[in-house]
Image (cartoon, helix red, strand yellow):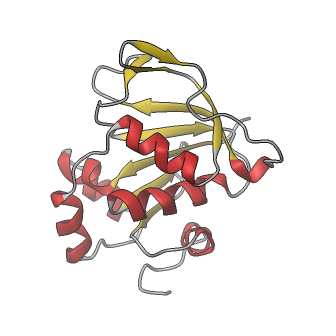
Amino acid sequence: MSHTVHINPLRWFTDGEGGLEFVESFGMPVPADLLEEARAASYPQVGDLLGVLRGEGLSARCWFSLWVDGAEVADPLPERPGGGDGDHLGGLALAVAGERKRIGADEPASGLTCRAPGEGAVERAVVALAEAFGPQVIWAGDVGEVVVVPPGWTAERVRRGRAGCDMADS
């Protein structure tokens, strides 16, 4: 069985009815300052989101086509020579309006899904996305783990958070 992990901006959960309740139902109240930051944040553009992941040295098998200026980008998150398992996000899908496979770089993204990521890759991704775009939420496809990741956390801190640590326990 492949492991599936989702990463969404905290804003996505505050925008939808019941979203914040879902996050907090896993025993982690979201501090008011993070909620304010999340509500003020814009959804990142697909090109910017992919640029952050590339900058972190991450790669993926993209399950979408990225289009820039009317042309398809051959490999939006290519594997890097010498890259290891911890650099690979697995199969990657992006959430954009209309759930299309052909995505423009300037479209807002409300999240990503990683299928069978390498160990440590999603923690690195969520930390980089939180630094660039504000608070993020990482959650497993089986809804067994939900962690709010504010800017300033490390990948190790996310791993501890996924192991059940409280947000105030740094």
Left or right placement of residue 107 versus residue 121 in this view: left
User: Dividing the picture into quarters, in which one does residue 89 lie?
Assistant: top right
Q: 103 above or below 114?
A: above
Residue 26 visible at all: no
Left or right placement of residue 67 versus residue 125 in this view: left
| Rendered residue at 80%/42% (across/down) | 81
**Residue 59 image offset from top left, x and y in percent:** 65, 40
| Rendered residue at 58%/39% (across/down) | 114
**Residue 98 image offset from top left, x and y in percent:** 29, 19
Left or right placement of residue 115 versus residue 38 in this view: right
Task: Name the foreground residue: 112 vs 67.
Answer: 67
Task: Name the foreground residue: 105 vs 69.
Answer: 69
| Rendered residue at 49%/74% (across/down) | 153
**Residue 52 image offset from top left, x and y in percent:** 48, 50
**Residue 147 image offset from top left, x and y in percent:** 46, 63
Residue furthest bottom as drawn: 169
